[in-house]
Amino acid sequence: MYQDEHVIFRGSFRKFVEREIVPHIPRWEAERMIPREAWEKMGASGFLCPWLPEEYGGSGADFLYSVIIAEELARAGAVSLMAPLHSDIIAPYIHRLGTEAQKRRWLPKCASGEIVLAIGMSEPNAGSDLAALATRAERDGDAYVVNGSKTFISNGIQADLVVVACRTDRNARGSRGISLLCVERGTPGFSRGRKLEKMGLHAQDTAELIFEDCRVPAGNLLGEENKGFHYLMEHLQQERLIVTIMAQAMAEAMLDMTIAYAGERKAFGQTIGSFQHNAFKIVEMATEVRLGRTFLDRLVDRHAAGEEIVTDVSMAKAWTAEMANRVAYQCVQLHGGYGYMEEYAICRFSRDVRPIAIFAGTTEVMKLIVARKMDLL
Ligand SMILES: Cc1cc2nc3c(=O)[nH]c(=O)nc-3n(C[C@H](O)[C@H](O)[C@H](O)COP(=O)(O)OP(=O)(O)OC[C@H]3O[C@@H](n4cnc5c(N)ncnc54)[C@H](O)[C@@H]3O)c2cc1C
């Protein structure tokens, strides 16, 4: 599926990641923030939203370029720089649902890195059960007045524009009466809450967002009023595919670094990888990793061809996230005490891979979707 130009692009992006990102990760982890310059450098080099048409600041690249960027960042242990979330999960909402004026106003800055995006779906009492969200937006003249809060929002502190899911019809229940509003930095009544302390993804600014009588211009509504839940469901296929790509690339990287380590580290006069028990562990992981890759590549192909793959991508997201976490556990074990030390990359990888089984829909929610599609529930 990859052509020569994709291979060349992968090579140049990998070099960019090795030069501009990897050396800075320890500092970004300590500072608990990805600096703006990193976003701007990504943008200046054409690595943000490459799929956008040229008129909106992109280069009209096909989906495989987005896949390559997500894979290379994950492979390098740089998932805290959530460029795929920005480029391939949130920007598509603006591109597909936005008016011409909205697209011209925001998209070129998304491609340059001047605007960092976030999406606010989850609330303190609405995570898996998204239809329970309570943030309200009431129409008042030429604005919506938004009240409520969001939590666990990736890029929450840095974001210049947040796509916020809110309830616009106070009489509607469940998934009905939800709309998507673009809330911009500086809008009166919009503030950031706590920057959350997390188990991993230390360089990622995951935060609470607070809306208190926040007046959002009615012109910032994305798509039609009250169709928000439908839009969210439509876009989740690509979101889950991107997250699966991250999990798979991390599993591959963890396996590679562990094979290398097991071939060097000696105990009882031999390399630890040459104990049959450990060799078998590595073989089991390599088999799972290869299965994941085969499944994923097929899904990428089908998604790029415009097929509906909701069932399969939900299966893949659930299985790959769990597989990558099994691999993480075994790889730390094979590193012994060094696996628990920051100076070894496996330590950070094992922390950062954990939430992939939680965000973009938990493993259990993925199974719910598949079970319903199979008419089991
Ligand atoms: C690092 C990180 C980044 C995130 N970024 C974002 C973001 O940018 N934007 C955003 O909107 N959200 C974001 N989230 C939130 C994420 O999407 C939610 O955490 C997730 O959807 C789960 O919701 P919850 O945490 O409320 O868990 P709950 O919904 O409370 O679930 C708790 C447990 O119960 C299980 N469960 C729930 N319902 C069922 C059921 N019907 N059957 C079986 N089991 C069930 C769940 O699988 C889970 O194991 C992020 C989360 C993390 C950890």
Image (cartoon, helix red, strand yellow):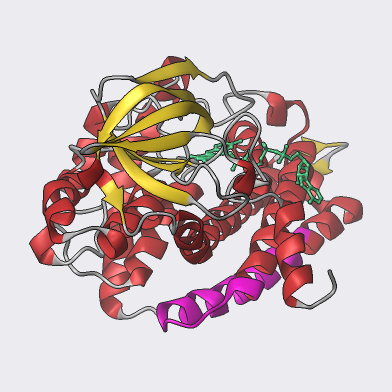
Is 296 contained in the magenta span? yes
* Quarter where residue 203 is shown: top left
Q: Is residue 75 visible?
A: yes
Q: Is residue 341 above or below residue 80?
A: above
Report ligand 1 position as a quadrant: top right
Q: Is residue 247 above or below residue 161?
A: below
In the image, taking residue 226 as reference, residue 87 lies left or right, namely left
- Pick the residue in front: 111 or 258: 111
Residue 119: x, y in percent?
42, 42
Residue at horizontal 74 percent and vertical 65 percent from the top = 288
Residue at horizontal 12 percent and vertical 54 percent from the top = 101
In the image, taking residue 288 as reference, residue 159 lies left or right, namely left
Residue 128: x, y in percent?
67, 46
Secondary structure of the magenta portion, mostly?
Answer: helix
- Pick the residue in front: 278 or 328: 328
Of the 4 image quadrants, the one containing the C terminus is: bottom right
Range drawn in magenta: 285-311
